[in-house]
Image: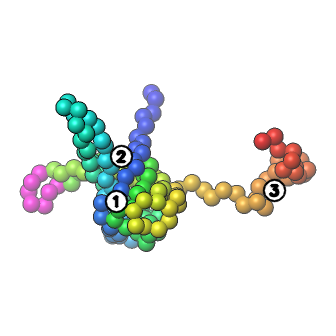
Amino acid sequence: MAEGMNKVLLIGNLGQDPELRYTQGGQAVLNLRLATNESFLNKDNERQERTEWHSVIVWGKRGEGLNKILTKGKQLCIEGRLQTRSWEDKQGGGKRYATEIVAINVILLGGGSGRGAGTSYDDSPPPPRDDDAASSRAGAGGGAMQDDDDIPF
């Protein structure tokens, strides 16, 4: 059986300042409200605009770091996955549901009043340092280090 794919990609603006909380175990959780806008023509050929609001969750140190630089209005690109959680309403209203985007990658796009245009926060490992790349080339080639001129691209 083939695996499914759960991937979301949104570009929008923060509708309010982020809210940083901590779980009982001390894990940071940053809550974002992201607005995406869609423009279309209605049946009378009049331009209409529709705004969708998305709840975005950013976990851990990344959430703590983003909390320091994000402000209402900031334009972001969010890559993540959908997650639906449920709970019992304490006022006896039955079962409640919320669908959120769990962010895997957050890219600051430069709009709005926040700092850090073009900055990306993701879970990928950092690129190798120049001395790491040189040592890995030396080890892979039987001890002979290649010059940059020998690389075919």
Please state, as top left, top right, bottom left or bottom right, where the N terminus lies in the image: top left
Indicate whether residue 144 is drawn in magenta: no
For discs 2 and 1, the disc positioned in front in the rendered view:
1
Boundaries of the magenta span = 88-94
Element type at mark 2: strand
Can you identify the residue that label 2 sits on?
82
Is 134 positioned to the left or the right of 114 in the image? right
User: In the depicted view, which residue is nearer to us: 13 or 143?
Assistant: 13
Is 111 positioned to the left or the right of 135 in the image? left
Percent position of residue 135, x then y: 81, 57
Give the residue type that dot 3 points to: Ala
N-terminal of the pair, mark 3 or mark 1, is 1
N-terminal of the pair, mark 2 or mark 1, is 1
Q: From mark 3 to mark 2, how far is it between C-alphas? A: 40 Å
N-terminal of the pair, mark 3 or mark 2, is 2
Is 67 positioned to the left or the right of 133 in the image? left
Rendered residue at 26%/44% (across/down): 49
